[in-house]
Image: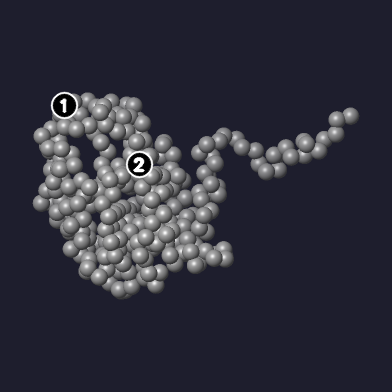
Amino acid sequence: MTKPGVTDQIKFLPKRIILVRHGESEGNIDGSAYSTTPDYKIPLTKQGMEQAKLAGSQIRSVVSDSGSTNNWKVYFYVSPYARSRSSLREIGRSFPKKSVIGVREECRIREQDFGNFQITERMKIIKETRERFGRFFYRMPEGESAADVYDRVSSFLESLWRDIDMNRLNHDPSTDLNLIIVSHGLASRVFLMKWFKWTVEQFEHLNNLNNCEFRILQLGAKGEYSLAVYHSDEEMQKWGLSPEMIADQKWRANATSGEGNEKCPWYLDVFFDGLGADSDDGDNDDQKVVS
């Protein structure tokens, strides 16, 4: 049973938060582009523009329930990088102006900083070292680690919740609100990591999003967001989610808002070995009388 007041809270929440990676860029097909062009200026390829245009039509189909409803709005957040801005422009072609209630450029969801111009042979050695060191904590020389990106994306999430809580997005609760975040592969993965409280070890097994691939966090019936509302087990397994992580997503799809995955049966086992059963917790020891 849904807790009192939860239903009222749910109607003010976005129905979906959709994370989209940018389309194919010149840097994706030729790494030497980064040695002469600043990362933030790397443009999309023609293929990338087509990918973004297709993603726009696919996302519109999702938010409109395959065209069966017009009772929806979208609000966009976008990385300042040229490939993300161009992807947004192509995605936007699928949306009528009346359905877009706003857009905001957000620097905190930009690409990981690899350090100014990137020399191809040097970057090859750096990325090999990163694989041996660990993808999350390895800091690029003159750049960032995934942990650094996690910190700034966490800050963005706090702002996002304030926007929602204070209704800065001007959301009419009689319509379905969809937040669409057009960003980068790593930023999207650490967003999910922060949102679902995944561990560093779980992050290390995640696969990157393909160009213009998207992940949909959809609101469950009782107020928790989950990937499992829209996506299948097979999709989540393909992305690198373990059976326990998939079980958590399926649990969240029907969980009451605010419960959190600490109540999921497997969650404590990630951190502890051999926790005693409740009947063995030793509470009766305090009642023993020393003679």
Whole-percent x and y of residue 162?
Answer: 41, 54
Can you see residue 185? Answer: no
Instruction: Tell me the element at label 2.
Output: helix
- Return the residue nearer the eye: 190 or 73: 73
Whole-percent x and y of residue 181?
Answer: 29, 53
The answer to which quarter of the image holds residue 193 is top left
Name which residue lies at 35% across and 57% down. Answer: 17
Can you see residue 222? Answer: yes
Sequence-first tag of 1 and 2? 1
What residue is disc 2 on?
152
Whole-percent x and y of residue 73?
Answer: 31, 67
Badge 2 density bin: few <14, some 14–19, many ≥20, Cα 10 Å: some
Q: Which mark is drawn over residue 164?
A: none
Name which residue lies at 52% across and 54% down. Answer: 258
Q: Amino acid at mark 2?
A: Arg
Q: Amino acid at mark 1?
A: Glu
Can you say which quadrant of the picture contains the C terminus? top right
Q: Which mark is drawn over residue 121?
A: 1
Mark 1 or 2: the one toward you: 2
Is residue 287 left or right of 224 when viewed as pictured? right
- Return the residue nearer the eye: 98 or 190: 98
Could you give the CA–CA distance between mark 1 and mark 2, rounded to whole angstroms? 29 Å
Figure check: 156 above or below 281: below
Whole-percent x and y of residue 123?
Answer: 20, 29
Instruction: Tell me the element at label 1.
Output: helix
